[in-house]
């Protein structure tokens, strides 16, 4: 049988435990702050990457053309300043100014009938393009007046393009979910 005689100093044990606990608490606090900073940095990076496209110009595709056209006409103020790009043919009415045209598409309404739909556009270069010629434009949505308040695209770039195979666009549908930005 072995007997040990150990003298326990309560003050030394308390100080040692307190020092160990302090080191543990500081380590946990530093790790927590580090993780919190990384979380906010990654969250902000994700917001930038996920919510803002690499280009600030929305490309309007034919399948959503009439949905976007309808939404922008119904909520002009929401979309003023939005930059968009799309293609269609130049369509003019007799009462248009020299710098005005509609960038149009034919909307299928059934029984092989179509309606001309599109955005009114303004461009100093509009005279360079014949009526019914196909162009691609880039521009900014503004609010204007033509028989009432309407969106008008202020064209910043216009170029000739070829007529697509399917030049028609569908009727607007209820499945389209509008947002404050066209993307």
Image (cartoon, rainbow, N blue to C red):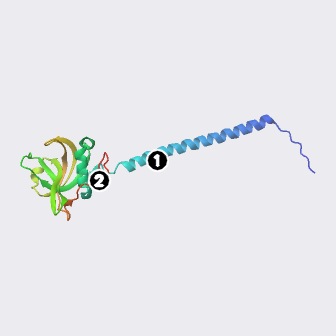
Disc number for residue 174? 2
Q: Position of residue 80 (x, y in %)?
A: 25, 42
Residue at horizontal 16%, vertical 59%?
A: 114
Disc number for residue 74? none
Which SS class for mark 1?
Answer: helix
**Farthest residue in the left direction?**
94
Q: Nearer the viewer, mark 2 or mark 1?
A: 2
Q: Nearer the viewer, residue 172 or 164?
A: 172
Q: Nearer the viewer, residue 150 or 164?
A: 150
**Farthest residue in the right direction?**
1
Q: Is residue 55 above or below residue 163?
A: above
Q: Position of residue 139 (x, y in %)?
A: 21, 48
- Name the residue tied to disc 1: 42
Residue at horizontal 19%, vertical 63%?
A: 164
Q: Position of residue 173 (x, y in %)?
A: 27, 55
Left or right of 6, for residue 138: left
Left or right of 169, for residue 95: left
**Farthest residue in the top direction?**
11
**Farthest residue in the front direction?**
111
Residue at horizontal 59%, vertical 40%?
A: 29
Picture mark count = 2
Q: Is residue 91 above or below residue 17?
A: below
Q: Nearer the viewer, residue 152 or 138?
A: 152
Which SS class for mark 2?
Answer: loop
Q: Earlier in the sequence, mark 2 or mark 1?
A: 1
Residue at horizontal 75%, vertical 36%?
A: 14
Q: Position of residue 66 (x, y in %)?
A: 23, 54
User: Could you tell me how far apart the alpha carbons at marks 2 and 1 are, in whole angstroms?
Assistant: 36 Å
């Amino acid at each position: 049988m072995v007997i040990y005689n150990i003298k326990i100093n309560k003050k030394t044990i308390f100080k040692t435990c307190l020092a160990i606990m302090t080191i543990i608490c500081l380590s946990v606090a530093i790790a927590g702050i580090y993780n919190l900073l990384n979380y906010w940095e990654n969250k902000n990076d994700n917001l930038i990457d996920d919510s803002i496209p690499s280009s600030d110009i929305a490309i309007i595709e034919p399948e959503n053309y009439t949905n976007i056209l309808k939404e922008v006409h119904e909520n002009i103020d929401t979309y003023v300043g939005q930059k968009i790009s799309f293609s269609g043919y130049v369509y003019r009415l007799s009462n248009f100014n020299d710098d005005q045209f509609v960038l149009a598409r034919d909307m299928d309404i059934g029984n092989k009938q179509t309606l001309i739909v599109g955005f009114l556009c303004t461009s100093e270069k509009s005279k360079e393009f014949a009526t019914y010629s196909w162009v691609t434009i880039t521009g900014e949505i503004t609010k204007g007046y033509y028989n009432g308040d309407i969106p008008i695209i202020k064209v910043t770039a216009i170029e000739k393009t070829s007529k697509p195979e399917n030049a028609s666009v569908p009727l607007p549908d209820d499945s389209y979910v509008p947002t404050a930005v066209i993307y």
